[in-house]
Image (cartoon, rainbow, N blue to C red):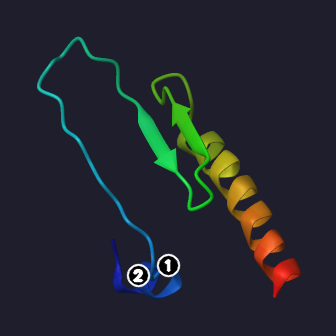
Amino acid sequence: MTDESRLLNPHIKINTTVSTDINEKPSINVTFRDGKTLDFAHETMKIDDVLKVLQKHARKLRDIEEANS
């Protein structure tokens, strides 16, 4: 993670798990601060598609926070 991204996302937590099982399918699991969990089988998705879904939910959270403040 770059210093710039840390400044933009000071509360972000990133956990990684590396499997040694070559038969295990690659995946990306994301848990947002509202508790919503998204699971991606990224072998079938392009990274741009994954980012679009992530950004859509992040925008929704931001809009809710702005409405409540």
Quarter of the picture holding the N terminus: bottom left
| Gap in angstroms between the C-alphas marked 2 and 1 | 5 Å
Q: Position of residue 26 (x, y in %)?
A: 35, 27
Q: Determine which of the numbered discs, if any, sits on residue 61 in the image.
A: none
Asked if the residue under mark 1 is in contact with the one under mark 2, i.e. CB atoms within 8 Å, the reply is: yes
| Disc 1, SS | loop
Q: Is residue 44 above or below residue 5?
A: above
Which amino acid lies under the numbered mark 2 shown in the image of this protein? Arg
Q: Residue at x 35, y 60 (%)?
A: 14
32 displayed left or right of 67 = left
Q: Which residue type carries mark 1?
A: Asn
Residue 33 in percent (x, y) is at 56, 62
Q: Residues within 10 Å of mark 2 (few under 14, many from 20)?
A: few
Query: Which residue is at the far right?
Result: 67
Please report the residue visible at 11 percent of the width from the left and 26 percent of the height from the top. 20
Residue 6 bears which disc, if any? 2
Residue 48 position within the rendered picture, expressed as x and y whole percent measured from the top left: 61, 46
Work out whether residue 47 or residue 62 is closer to the camera in this orientation and state it.
62
Q: Count the labels in the image.
A: 2
Q: Is residue 53 shown above or below 12?
A: above
Q: Is residue 4 left or right of residue 69?
A: left
Disc 1 residue crowd, few under 14, some 14–19, many 20+, Cα 10 Å: few
* Residue marked by disc 1: 9
Dividing the picture into quadrants, the one containing residue 69 is: bottom right
Residue occupying the point 88% across, 79% down: 67
Disc 2 on helix, strand or loop? helix
Residue that extends furthest to the top in the rendered view of this protein: 23
